[in-house]
Structure formats: C-alpha cells, structure tokens
Image (cartoon, rainbow, N blue to C red):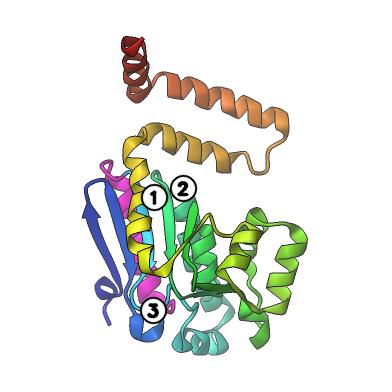
Amino acid sequence: MAAAETVLYTMSDSLARITLNRPDKRNALNDELIAGLKRALRRAHDDHDVKAVIISGAGPDFCSGADLSALQKIATASVAENLEDARSLMEVFTLIRSLRPPVIAAVKGRALAGGCGLASACDLVLAARSSRFGYPEVRIGFVPAMVMAILRRNISEKRAFELLTLGREITSEEAFALGLVNRLIDDEAFEDEVDAFVEQFARTSSSAVALTKRLLYQTDAMSFEDALHCGVDTNVTARLSEDCRKGIERFLNKK
C-alpha cells in the first residue's frame, strides 16, 4: 500500500483531519504510515487556516503499534538501520510538539505500544469509553523508550513505572483517572462529540493558542525563574500580535 493511501488528510473549515488508514492491520505503524503521518503534520503546520488537527484511526482501532514486518525488520537490522528507524518515529513525536495548531488524538478501540505513544504525544486525548491503552513492549523483550519521555510528562513516576514494566492493557476509565485522557465519550456519540469539542478552537485566536502551546512545552525543563522570563517574552510577543490588538479593540468597544 502506498504512503499516500496509508494516511488520509482532509480539511473542513479550520479543522484538519489526519486518518491512519490501515484498518486491516489495526493501523499498525510501518515506514509508509510514519512517512505519510509526518507529511500530513507538516501540511497542517504550513496551512495557517488550520486551527486544530485531529488524528484518528480507520476501522475499529486507533493504532496497535509496530506491525509484524516492522518487528521483523528490527530483529535483522544493523545498528545504523535501527537508529535511523527509531529516529524516524521520534520525528513524529517532535513534530506534534512543535506543530503550530493543537493536535487532538481521537481514540477508539486499542491504542497500544507506539500507538499509545502517538496518542499521548498529542496535546489532547479524547477517548471512546470502549477504548483501551497500553505499553506491552516489555512482554517481547522490547523497551518503550521514546514514548517514556512522553508518558513521564503525562502521569506520575510510579504510575508510569507500573504501565511500562507490567505491559498490561488498561481501560479508558483507568487512562482517564491516570491523566492520559482528557475526555471520555460514549461510543455511540463519539464522532459528534469529538467534532463539538474540537470546534471550540475555531473560536480562539490561532496565534495565542500557538504561543501558549510553545511556551507550555518550552518551560518543561526550566527553573521557575527561567520559565517566568520566558513567559515575559511570550507575553510581549502576544501583545504585539494582530489577534491581540483586534481582541482588545473588540473588548473595549463592548464596554
């Protein structure tokens, strides 16, 4: 299957939809899908009409992680080949973080291993009540290494240790309680509720949301004082933006 077919990209008003399109393989990650996903993310970043991005999976599952051919490739690849392969997946996670608009994972079915990492790498996670999450890599002697950096920023250290080392699947309710999921949605209303949630970004300032997203992640490893200084710079940038000037003007005119 060609890369253009494994990832679908559609645009509706100010919303970009990226669909992982390997339903027969539970949207498992392979080279073609990863390459297509990166192209779609860059396309959304470059289109300044996009106010939010939804990533979802075709068929019953969101993403089951690496597919069989990818695992076979890992088993026979050289160090250099494995390094290149790992860095390619890493680029997906860094792209999501650096993307201008917010990225929302809409999870139905299973989000496992790299698929769970992909969901939790997004800025927000909306999950159907029947969905399941997990990092089963340790069960085949593998390490969920890159997704660990994401998970560690989402939940507590001890909860992360449990998920990463036991490798069990958890329910959407457990994921919500841990902080992996922002909203739980009944299955029968999933698509409509996701649309309603994401459409809230159509009423926000794109520049303000982009600046907020960048600052939030930029301050991860900063001291309190450095984070405040960074906040000062962002505050000034926001004040000078066209969106801010127009927003203040509208507010004052209402008064």
Q: Does 184 sit left or right of 190 as displayed?
A: right
Q: Is residue 183 left or right of residue 222?
A: left
Any part of residue 212 in sight: yes
Q: Which residue corresponds to the image point at 42% horizontal and 77% vertical from the top-left? A: 61
Helix, strand or loop at label 1? It is helix
Quarter of the image for the N terminus: give it: bottom left
Instruction: Tell me the SS state at disc 2.
Output: helix
Asked if the residues shown at circle 1 and circle 3 are in contact, with their CB atoms under 8 angstroms apart, the answer is: no
- Residue 8 lies in the magenta-colored region: no
- Marks 2, 3: nearer the viewer: 3
Residue that appears at 53% across and 69% down: 116
Closer to the eye: label 1 or 2: 1
Front-lying residue, 29 or 51: 51
Secondary structure, magenta segment, majority class: helix
Residue 112: quadrant of the picture: bottom right
Q: Which badge, 1 or 3, comes first in the chain's sequence? A: 3
Q: Is residue 44 magenta?
A: yes
Q: Position of residue 58 (x, y in %)?
A: 33, 74
Work out how far the residue at label 1 is from the one at label 3, CA to CA, in angstroms. Answer: 21 Å
| Amino acid type for the residue under numbered disc 2 | Ser
* Amino acid at the residue labelled 1: Phe
Q: Which residue is mark 1?
A: 197
Q: Label 2, on which residue?
A: 98
Please give the residue where the numbered disc 3 appears in the rendered image. Answer: 60
- Does label 1 or label 2 sit earlier along the sequence? 2
The residue tagged with tag 3: helix, strand or loop?
Answer: loop
Magenta segment boundaries in residue numbering:
27-50
Closer to the camera, 200 or 22? 200
